[in-house]
Every structure is written in C-alpha cells, then in structure tokens.
Amino acid sequence: MKGKVIIFSAPSGSGKSTIIKYLMQQGLNLAFSISATSRPPRGTEQDGVEYFFLSPEDFRKRIDNDEFLEYEEVYEGRYYGTLKAQVERQLEAGQNVILDIDVHGGCRIKEFYGDRALSVFIQPPSVEALRQRLHHRGMDSPEVIEQRIDRAEYELGFAPKFDIVIVNDDLQIAQCQALERLRAFLGK
C-alpha cells in the first residue's frame, strides 16, 4: 500500500523537531525525506543518507527538468530541495514520508499532493514565548535571535494555509495532539 506525505513547518524554536522525533518513535511507519543540496558534504555526511549532494550545475539542470517538489537557493549557488523521485520511491515502498520544511516548501508540497498530504504547522504560544525559548537555548547571539523572531513573525502568517495548527504551549499536549491527528490521517 502506498504511503502518505506528512509536512511539518514551524518557526525556529517552536518545538517542531522535538515533536517529530517523538512521532518517529510511535510505530507509524514514518521515514524522513532525504533532501538534495548543492553544498559539499560536511564531516562524515554521506550521499543518500543525510542529503543527496549535487553540483550547482546538476541542481539547476534538475530544476529546469522540473524534478523538484520544492527548492530554494539559500545563498548564491547554494541550493536545497526535495526531489520528486525520492519521495515517490519512499511512498511506493509504503513509507509515510515526513518532511521538516520551511513554510513556502510546505505549501508547495501540499499543493502537489493534495489529500495525500497532511500539512502541520507547529506554532509557539506567543512571539514573546518564542523569544524566551530561543534565548534559553543559548545557541544564538541576541542579533541572531531577533532575526529569527522577525522570520517567525513572517512565518506565522502562513499558519492558516496548513491543514492543522498545533500550538506548542505544553510539549506533552502538543505531542499527543500531533499523534492523534497523524493516526487519524494514516488510518491507524
């Protein structure tokens, strides 16, 4: 039986990765989509494991051939994207493909797959709560935190375009809500 597509988007610091990690452990036959990038591998990264590593020329050729569900040129010559063929291989193998992706890519993939995809937006309880989370993580300078907040305020405007919006005020409640909605969507 063919798998389904689950799209997760959220502003940085909303708890999306933690919720996805929890869902991956719930026996729902979830598998991550492997993205493509034109950047070189870092450290021990392997082609086909962390990413599909493509040259910028090959990436652009694949864009011209309409081989991507979505892509973005993050910096000049530095592309990231989701290959249609990769997601289709996973779906044909019966996997439920989970994508952790930005709001633009999430909207494009939902449009492509329609009812075969569930789009989930993880929302912080407030911008101020998000600012506090980012500050407590201790990973970014105050300037970077403010850039993330500006980006988050923009991304929050996309929430109504998603099938489900889960407000992550209490992580356990948000995890339970996400699990319940995924089980209903997957028929499990």
Image: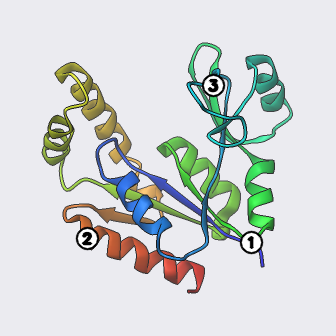
Give the numbered dot on residue 182.
none
Residues at marks 2 and 3, CA–CA distance in whole angstroms: 35 Å
Rendered position, 169 above or below 156: below
Decide which of 175, 105 is in the foreground and name it: 175
Q: Is residue 48 left or right of residue 50?
A: right
Residues at marks 1 and 2, CA–CA distance in whole angstroms: 29 Å
The amino acid sitting under disc 2 is Gln
Q: Is residue 178 left or right of residue 65?
A: left
Residues at marks 1 and 3, CA–CA distance in whole angstroms: 29 Å
Rendered position, 47 above or below 172: above
Q: Residue at x 40, y 71 (%)?
A: 178
Q: Kindly state the secondary structure of the residue where label 3 is placed.
A: loop
Q: In this view, does 62 lie to the left or right of 182?
A: right
Q: Kindly state the secondary structure of the residue where label 2 is placed.
A: helix
Say which quadrant the C terminus sits in: bottom right
Residue holding disc 3: 41
